[in-house]
Image (cartoon, helix red, strand yellow):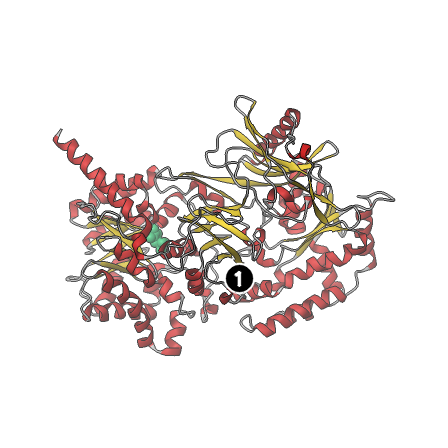
Amino acid sequence: MAVLWLEDVDADDVGVVGGKGASLGELIGAGLPVPPGFVVTAGTYREFIEGAGIDETLFDAVDVDPEDSTALREAEATARELITETPFPDPVREEILESYRSMGTEDDEAFVAVRSSATAEDLPDSSFAGQQETFLNVREADLLRRVKECWASLFTQRAIYYRQQRGFPHEDVDIAVVVQRMVDAEKSGVMFTSHPSTGDPQMTIEAAWGLGEAVVSGTVSPDNYVYDRSRATVEDVTVADKKVEMVRDPESGETVQLDLDEERRTERVLSDAEIDDLVTLGERVEEHYGTPQDVEWAVFEGEIYMLQSRPITTIREDADGASGESETTDGDAGSGHEAAAAIGDGDGEAGEDGGDDVLVSGLGASPGAVSGAVRIVDKLDHLDQVEEGDVLVTEMTMPDMVPAMKRAAGIVTDEGGMTSHAAIISRELGVPAVVGTGNGTRVLKDGGSVTIDGDKGTVRAGADEGAEPAEEFEPVEAARPETPVKPMTATEVKVNVSIPEAAERAAATGADGVGLLRIEHMVLSLGKTPERYIADHGARAYQDELIDGIRAVAEEFYPRPVRVRTIDAPTDEFRELEGGEGEPVEPNPMLGWRGTRRSLDKPEPFRQELAAFGRLIEMGYDNIEVMFPLVNDATDIEGVKRHLQEAGIDPEDHTWGVMIETPASALLIDELADAGIDFASFGTNDLTQYTLAVDRNNGHVADRFDELHPAVLRLIGDTIDRCRERGVDTSICGQAGSKPEMVEFLVEKGVSSISANIDAVRDVQHEVKRVEQRLLLDSVR
Ligand code: PEP
Ligand code: MG
């Protein structure tokens, strides 16, 4: 059988019908009203290429050097031609057409959406499989061609590039195609089944006339209805002035925008009875999945249809209570909000808190609000497209994007959490950023004007008069304390730095030193693995690169201490670089070959790092301290000590220490102290993920990533106690050092220093001061 009906599949059928097909089938199976449709299975695609005997030619054609853009372009063209020019076997063609016809009537052909639904769930990002292809308002004449175009979308340049680069075999990726009836909505919208930031049982429904595209694209301000589920009442109704509606032109099938007459503009879209029906539906979806959902719905001839449902991951209120942030993550393989397209040709996401024009939302990773033109870039694009004042939108930033990130007024990414490359670098550059939007690159339109809010984590349509004018680089003055005299605190307050360009801003905060200078970004921006760089340019040149970057920071802070950390990049990041082909493919790089364990196993580039530090110290930068990441026990410490000695840095008379990032290192702090460390610095990003078994980069569990969890605090508190007894300094350099609750806990515990992000230093200084004064007062009262 070439096709399966959606009602006959469920979440377990990803391998047969792809992620999108499986999630729609799951909803139908739960008894939820989803527009009917079928899936041309992955097996059908496979039989098509094998039956026609084009499989080998196809896979050979796309086995090209991913860095050769001409070869990539040719590979895409060849694959496309092979697929589209090869005829369907008759029985398959008939089965697809028969299934399609059964959705319409004799004289009324059905309008369907045709979408690719890839099966390669284990790709790092399934969007690389090319499953984003979507065709709307398709009728019989175009159906078969569109199905083949979905198949061909497995071989876009981008998809080929990523699979080649990651060594992911092309023959392991299959693709299914969903064919689903479009709903000619009279009214439609979105709903959050619970409050998106607090998780309270409060449902928010947004509704407008016509197709949902108007709501998800932000063209129309929808009505807003708030329903209190615990009291079972409509709590609040805000009727908006809805100037237009989107409808389907019956002739062309295109989506068109119509002006509404006076009366309908301000007419309430949903009756109380309809709200009740939607609430019932919302509760059923939430119950089915066991988590709050973000649902798209449409009403057609009095029936409500569900077009998509995705979990809402709730992020706790920010430590300072400044803003609740909510992140919406994809419930299935990259389905995003694509089902929105079933009600229009739009594709978008409605924001939380009744935001009327929020296009996408994610984590507010770097504060500030700016407006600018959207510039969507990916690895294959030329980054020079990003101009001064643009909003850079990308899946995930890479080290080679830093120059473009500097030019950008704001940054939006699909992936990543608060400790991702994009979040760290944009904070240091002082560029507002929203990360982990899930679908920013798909929803935002290149060239469109948007306003991003890096505090709330929202991207809105249009320019905002109140938003800050775009600055190339936030001036040093902005980071300098407003009060000329920084608060004097007994606990030192330091700053984290990852890119040398941020040194001046970092030093201007009045921080007592650098608690963590990461070198990953300096190394990755060379574009080659350290091994390859050394092979091509020599060890001395590699040392010189490190020296240039580190010196910029050491100089700026002299004589304040700067803790330089040896490299801690996971294999998947090294693999992106030239020379990274040989990196092992690890099932979980976070638990893999990174940090000190890798350095000890592979002493060659490690020696050059330490040699660079040694040369800097010799040059007179005696404010440099050496820090080792991801250690577990005394064996690791003995290893790094030997290397320090070899590099001419005497561990007896030079300050060095380790990060406490694993429960092992916290529990074994006594043996680390015996082995001679001068300081222990809590890397709470890793300590939290390893203590709670919560991947710090995984949006699906982001709500469980809690650095203030009692288990994490117990490990930190006990370690500080032990270190105070042993005369070992303690510090924090993870993201949590910028949170007031953590600061309060650490100061009470007697931590020696706290290292915060540039933008948080000033607040941390004041918080430390406040806690210290309270402790003093408590002791004399
Ligand atoms: C940490 O783990 O908290 C840390 C500061 O290190 P990194 O950001 O490199 O993981
Ligand atoms: Mg770490």
Element type where label 1 sits in the image: loop
Residue at left offset 27%, top offset 47%: 762
Quarter that holds the C terminus: top left
Front residue of 59/211: it is 211
As drawn, which residue projects farthest toward the front? 262
Asked if one can make out residue 351 in the rendered structure from this viewpoint, the answer is: yes
Q: Position of residue 312 (x, y in %)?
A: 52, 40
755 sits to left or right of 572:
left
At a point 39% along the width and 74% down the height, the residue shown is 533
Q: Is residue 639 left or right of residue 186?
A: left
| Depth order, front residue of 596/763 | 763
Tell me the quarter of the picture where residue 105 sits: top right
Viewer-nearest residue: 212 or 220:
220
Q: Position of residue 340 (x, y in %)?
A: 64, 45
Instruction: Identify the residue at the far right of this view.
Output: 106
Residue to which mark 1 is pinned: 378
**Residue 3: percent from left, percent from top:** 75, 50
- Neighbourhood count class around disc 1 (C-alpha, 10 Å): few under 14, some 14–19, many 20 upward: some
Report the amino acid beneath label 1. Asp
- State the image quarter where residue 429 is shown: bottom left
Residue 460, above or below 779: below
Examine the rendered structure and indicate whether residue 69 appears above or below residue 593.
below
Q: Is residue 13 visible?
A: no
Seen from this angle, which residue lies furthest left?
780
The answer to whether residue 753 is left or right of residue 290 is left
